[in-house]
Amino acid sequence: MQILGIDGITHGVEDLPACRQFFLDWGLQLVDESAQALDFETLNGCQVQIRAASDATLPAAIESGPTLREAVWGVASAADLDALRVRLHDLESFRDEGDSLCCTDPNGLGLRFRVSRKRAVTVQGVPMNQWGTAPQRVDQRSHFYDRAEPVEVGHIVFFTPDLDAVVRFYIERLGFALSDSYPGRGAFLRCAAEGGHHDVFFLQLPTGKRGLNHVAYVVRDIHEVFGGGLHISRCGWETDIGPGRHPVSSAYFWYVKNPGGALAEYYTDEDMLTAAWQPREFESRPENFAEWAVLGGLDGQTRRQKHGPAAESATLAGQAGRK
């Protein structure tokens, strides 16, 4: 049985027009829309569906307000779907829809499994001239991104009140592997032995909160993280934190507040793992979240730290010029 990764997600939201604008600004392609539904895609066809929270066909919400209602996982073949059917059929929440299987995880999230509908794409990051390696860019200016175009949904992060139960479900029922952990607090899980550092991360807070933390979108390289973040800032959306870099997965990131629920993340350059990888244990503390990070982000107009001295000076100068 082989789960390939996230094939799609569905948000239940309260403000469809705001979500329409946000995901267009985020860099997704709008492929269909109606009064109560929006269908977007990443470059490789990973589906991002936006539905009115009142839609009775949606799985139940795991928290109040806009949030993720369903995660769709792609498998390699019909045989893999059959193998999952055997693993899941005894669950009370199990539902067989023929070409897809549905259930609910211990955190209350709706899950769907189907043969992957993502398509192969050829995308390439900016060639970099790194010391000790042959130059990759000669007599050529590097590329600067005006905005981001996410390749796919790479991972999702949730808060859970029962970390042990949800980790056991994903490992024993779905065949996920533990990559790293904050003992008693969080677990990074990947859907196959070989792949990116994590496809899902669960974090248990002392408050017992249940809900979405963020949905993460893969982009080509660190330059696209910056280009996408600056563009989303120019569009008026609020950065939570970023750019920055995670020590646990090595990935570069930029987190933005999302009207579809919680946060959306641009990220790139995560560690790639195999079955030889030995999970590590980390303390849950700020320096293990970020090697470095910019709180509040960079201003898309000034290209400087938002609310920092340079940004404030530029804002005052602009205001003076308009008087």
Image: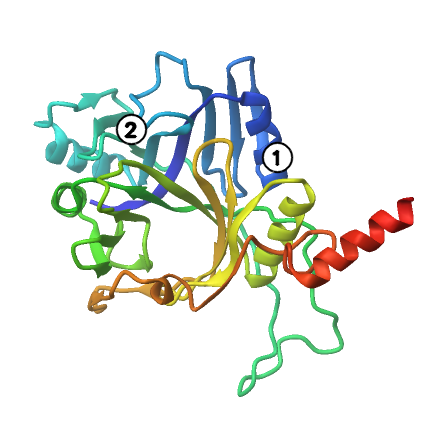
Q: Which residue is mark 1?
A: 24
The residue at 26%/64% (across/down) is 274
Residue 175 place in picture, x, y as percent: 17, 47
Residue 189 place in picture, x, y as percent: 25, 52
Left or right: 74, with 258 as reference point? left
Label 2 residue SS? loop
Position of 97 relative to 112 (above/below): above
Residue 29 place in picture, x, y as percent: 59, 34
Number of numbered markers:
2
Here the colouring is rainbow
User: Which residue is farthest left?
Assistant: 90
Label 1 residue SS? helix
The residue at 71%/57% (across/down) is 311
- Mark 2: amino acid: Ile
User: Which residue is farthest bottom?
Assistant: 132
Pointer 1 local density, CA inside 10 Å: few below 14, some 14–19, many at least 20: few
Q: Which residue is mark 2?
A: 62
The Cα–Cα distance between marks 2 and 1, rounded to whole angstroms, is: 26 Å
Residue closer to the observer: 132 or 97: 132
The residue at 28%/59% (across/down) is 194
Residue closer to the observer: 118 or 156: 156
Left or right: 145, with 85 as reference point? right
